[in-house]
Image: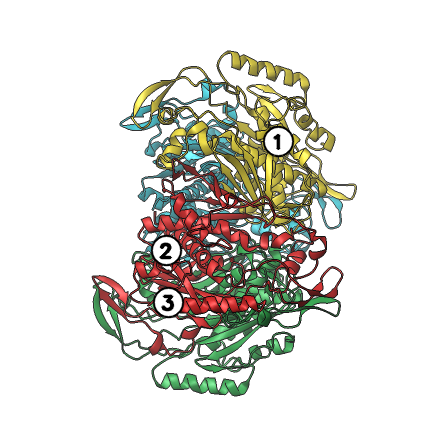
Chain colours: A cyan, B yellow, C red, D green
Amino acid sequence: MSSAWGDTLKLSIFGESHGPAVGVVIDGLPSGEELDMERILRFMDRRRPGKDPYSTPRKETDLPRVLSGVYNGKTTGTPLAVMIQNSDTHSADYSELASVARPSHGDFTGYVRYHGFNDPRGGGHFSGRLTAPLCFAGAAAIQMLERRGVSVGAHLASVADIPDLRYSTAELTVQELLAPGQKSFPVLDDGAGEKMRRRIEEARLAQDSVGGTVECGILGLPAGVGSPMFGGVENVLSSLLFGIPAVKGVEFGLGFEGSRLTGSQYNDSFCVRDGEIRTGTNRHGGILGGISSGMPILFCAAFKPTPSISRPQQTVDFIRKEPRELVIKGRHDPCVVPRAVPCVEAAAAFGILSLWLSCGGK
Amino acid sequence: MSSAWGDTLKLSIFGESHGPAVGVVIDGLPSGEELDMERILRFMDRRRPGKDPYSTPRKETDLPRVLSGVYNGKTTGTPLAVMIQNSDTHSADYSELASVARPSHGDFTGYVRYHGFNDPRGGGHFSGRLTAPLCFAGAAAIQMLERRGVSVGAHLASVADIPDLRYSTAELTVQELLAPGQKSFPVLDDGAGEKMRRRIEEARLAQDSVGGTVECGILGLPAGVGSPMFGGVENVLSSLLFGIPAVKGVEFGLGFEGSRLTGSQYNDSFCVRDGEIRTGTNRHGGILGGISSGMPILFCAAFKPTPSISRPQQTVDFIRKEPRELVIKGRHDPCVVPRAVPCVEAAAAFGILSLWLSCGGK
Amino acid sequence: MSSAWGDTLKLSIFGESHGPAVGVVIDGLPSGEELDMERILRFMDRRRPGKDPYSTPRKETDLPRVLSGVYNGKTTGTPLAVMIQNSDTHSADYSELASVARPSHGDFTGYVRYHGFNDPRGGGHFSGRLTAPLCFAGAAAIQMLERRGVSVGAHLASVADIPDLRYSTAELTVQELLAPGQKSFPVLDDGAGEKMRRRIEEARLAQDSVGGTVECGILGLPAGVGSPMFGGVENVLSSLLFGIPAVKGVEFGLGFEGSRLTGSQYNDSFCVRDGEIRTGTNRHGGILGGISSGMPILFCAAFKPTPSISRPQQTVDFIRKEPRELVIKGRHDPCVVPRAVPCVEAAAAFGILSLWLSCGGK
Amino acid sequence: MSSAWGDTLKLSIFGESHGPAVGVVIDGLPSGEELDMERILRFMDRRRPGKDPYSTPRKETDLPRVLSGVYNGKTTGTPLAVMIQNSDTHSADYSELASVARPSHGDFTGYVRYHGFNDPRGGGHFSGRLTAPLCFAGAAAIQMLERRGVSVGAHLASVADIPDLRYSTAELTVQELLAPGQKSFPVLDDGAGEKMRRRIEEARLAQDSVGGTVECGILGLPAGVGSPMFGGVENVLSSLLFGIPAVKGVEFGLGFEGSRLTGSQYNDSFCVRDGEIRTGTNRHGGILGGISSGMPILFCAAFKPTPSISRPQQTVDFIRKEPRELVIKGRHDPCVVPRAVPCVEAAAAFGILSLWLSCGGK
């Protein structure tokens, strides 16, 4: 694993923040799948910085350009490649800045990993911009899953200490699942959303930032997808989710909270409903033994606060090995988590499609 | 991914709980690595059921048998294969039980996934017994990492709602890291351990079970190991950790708690200490941009309560699609988390060794 | 790649010639596949040294022992592991011999690759004995392919300069395909076989050895299996075939001979036969663009002469870097190619099953 | 495997002949490697159609555009992506032609494999144009190998039945190895080259085509690179080489000819030369037990004749299942093998670099 992922369905993401383009090659997609590009663009708009998704005119440079793998609007089955041109980036003099480690960023670790040859401009390959091609891949996967009766949705489960409602686990409807994604601020409870926005604005004014969590749900996945041990739904999804910058935790079903319960409190009873095997509650998050149970897949991802804050920070010049005070300039998103919601959906959808195909689904 | 894992260093685990044997093939190990079998056995003893690791005579059938890959006490570099014979298991009549889904177990999902052909006896390939070969692989990896200056340790961070102390993140010593693993009950604070034991006993008496969490630390890993996106330390470790039955959450550094902080609270300042780049605090858990920072790697895994409880539970016969009341017989561990501590160490060590080798380390 | 192979269907082979056992783990098999063990044993007997497959009593130690993945005689879908115990091998003093490179063997290269830690006894992991677990895997794959209407057969196409007949490419029947495998000497033309046997005996008497070729055919594979570029039938089969010791060349259809023809001589015309698209001739060996065409898959593998000959040979002690004269003792097979015929079938069957499953077949 | 290849060093090739672009993502390259783009372009020119490599002005559209992975002229260590725009292709009406199978092409098999959704224009993803990105990857690998003392060269070993000289196996110099690649017609013996050209011209005039073979040599590779079984040099190279359209056979060292010899004729004696272990002859082609021996790696690839010939051919409309006479229009290369020489070098270089890195080389 690296920036390439997968066995059956392969993802190879490339690009640097200030290079010519970012993009992705997807190898192993089923053929004949219609791609609604307009919907893909709307999906990608949800992660765009500085967006107001329904009014702002789209900048040409943000448009993904399909280079291969689509013919007459449908997937060919051979590799699907997409590039997204980077806009003209004023490559200021990075020579100095390149050796001053921004706290919580990958500047220093990337420097060591690549022996000083990594592209440091705007974070290079470590930039959040690399989630744009991931969102393309996920948006395509979402359409393919829908055709198979599977829906993927997510919402901001919290910003700082302000919680949203949670997907009601056992009786989640597709409408409820997808509602947050259709709002400009992706929450279930708009009242909570209002508080979150204020909290983010407060952070901005304080030259600070905040973190948060995203809850994701997958509906309609039949029982029997996934594998025991390392091919489990949890393994596969987490191996993608931690590829989204700033994700520091992933939990399925009750997750950490479940570790505080007793077996009699936690175990979900099985029952028969409409001739199908179901569980009455869904503390297990739709996964048992690594395999989908037919109940909604539910998981939560934790995002650390945006690393870039404009307050002065203590750090070092890691080449000269000297202390430095750093003031990060430019506009920075005081909370990336709202924009990360589609990224989580994308990673989840791509992972689920991959599992579907590798378990013999077509 | 499935029960096989990895690109550079490959792990292929096999076996069923009541079959002839469980085992593992490890492909891609460096050659010439001495294996201290006595230490491997002591490590594996830590996960054994019904153990008292320093007095109980080891049962012959628990002994791992090296089938290949070791010559004159050292790794050959070609595949290392190990089998662990299963003891005589009274294969009672499973024909009926096989279709009654034990809540929180993989009985039903495994049945659907494998179209009814999975081995249902004792959970088959879904059994916790499959962590025995994982522990062998991890114990071998631990020795190889030690030779490279890297130490791996873990402890019970909580049982139900009773917390242990936490590894003091910035100045953790090897001694402190490894201390819990040398105790019969792997905690930092023996007082907390005493409370945990009582809580477990309480659960046992109530025919119930409890969950918990395990904190793991990795010391001595130099900066620069791991990769951005899907090859990050978080991705690689979580893809292994969720292979341990009952793990439902993984977080690195402050994890979920960190999502509630502001950037100014969360960001770790860099500094120069003894000529090395360090951070003053370690909220990031030793990983930035997917790559080790040179600080201790710290993460936590959440375990759901033991699924098997002896109280009557509501469930279904999933073949006949009829409700059933289930009473699980036999002795069951009311808390598997103490025995899971070495499993977490093993997964972590194997993942870190794999990353080390794939980043050009020898 | 190493001794582990595959993405969808994974093979992990382990063992050394004089270690405790050789074996294999197969991950990703479909569940519910009946394994006729008696037939597997008969298949494996065809590669046994010193065999007379229909009379010699089987030595207990040659018996493969299934460790997991089979329940009630059918595959469970979870990893199938098999070990084959090595018989008591008189581990003479190898300390000296270990540094004298047997010409055409991997003694020297293995020593360098593994820094002197490889098991040198009897060739260690480089031994032809490692094809025994490959044959198990292939024998299982053959049964699964048969159930899907696909047959795999092979024969000795030549020994030294003595040719057998060739599978008549366009109208090959299953009976003709499988006939050589049912003979004690696997040829199409028994007259040619007689000459080959004499040639082998001649080599034996001259303390020499001979090479040969194996032609393999696959019947009943529908059009559409395989992928362009690196996932082609040729790529996948050759990546397995070169894993059989002594294979030094692989060609599909007319292969090297075809490179001497013109397009008008080589191209196979398409036609419609019984409502199916076919070609009149089959110079393409059933593969176009990496994908099966529905015509028989035909390929040929070249084996170098057995490296071990009892004549004195000039070589070196590669530790002392001194010249040495080497006389290899013991009985050695003057021609391994007859025994390699089932190995080629096994590699082909495993590769085709893997392609079948990864192209969406069940 | 598919159009993505590799574990340690990954290659993901995309594009269709008449789509917007072809290209490649390479993941896992070492960082800090200088890329001489001028040399890469010269290398790629060698495979260009209708070329006269030293005079024709390069068409803009043939220029590879680096999208990521290079900064300040050196590799960053993160994915290197390249796209090569396709020139304006007059997409005539393909609707009819799309269902008429050109003999020896992948039209029919691609149609079946992808259920009719493959891009049929100009062969789509099956086109020889896909070797352009492979050549970019190989040209970059060649530079990295040179820096490590390894040289890769190839020449036309035959066209139809006209042979070139062969690399003299045991004492091949770098100069001799690379000489053919510097000629406009890549042969060792220009007299043979002249005959080959005439043979090709003859085929052109006869509205026919010819095949041929390419011999490739790798010098300077130290002993110890590669692995036994499926990770051998033969396995890895052949898994790439069969990705070049029209390759139908691969042999290492004496290959098929070696199968006709006796052991005493074939075995290469080891000797000590300049303090190094060498063999006196090199019938083994530099590979023993899958691992490099320190002698030159030598192999040969067989190419079938160009499938497209302008003579009328019998074929079928595979949708209507009706016979058709086909006359292929347009200019077609009566022999692609001269242009395939750099493709073979590219595949070899990429495979060897991958093996080098995965065996612990830096």
Look at 56% across and 38% down and name the residue there. B83
Instruction: Give above or below for D95 relative to B139.
Output: below
Instruction: Give above or below for A298 relative to C157.
Output: above
Q: What is the number of the mark on residue B44?
A: 1
What amino acid is found at the position of numbered circle 2 in the picture? Gly
Q: Alpha-carbon neighbours of circle 1 within 10 Å: few (<14), some, or many (≥20)?
A: many
List x then y, in percent, for residue A16. Answer: 55, 54
* Residue D316, image quadrant: bottom left
Look at 41% across and 69% down and name the residue there. C192
> In the figure, is residue C347 to the left or right of B32?
left
Instruction: Give above or below for C268 relative to B349.
Output: below
Q: CA distance from mark 1 to mark 2?
A: 47 Å
User: Chain ID for label 1?
Assistant: B
User: Chain ID for label 3?
Assistant: C
User: Chain ID for label 2?
Assistant: A
> In the figure, is residue D95 to the left or right of C102?
left
Please tell me if label 3 and label 1 are on a single chain: no
Query: Which of the pair D128/C359 is nearer the observer?
Result: C359
Secondary structure at numbered mark 2: loop
Q: Is residue A205 visible?
A: no
Q: What is the number of the mark on residue A77?
A: 2
Look at 63% across and 43% down and name the residue there. B353
Q: Nearer the viewer, mark 1 or mark 2?
A: 1
Secondary structure at numbered mark 1: helix
According to the image, label 3 marks what residue? Answer: C189
Please tell me if label 1 and label 2 are on a single chain: no
Query: Which of the pair D11/D261 is nearer the observer?
Result: D261
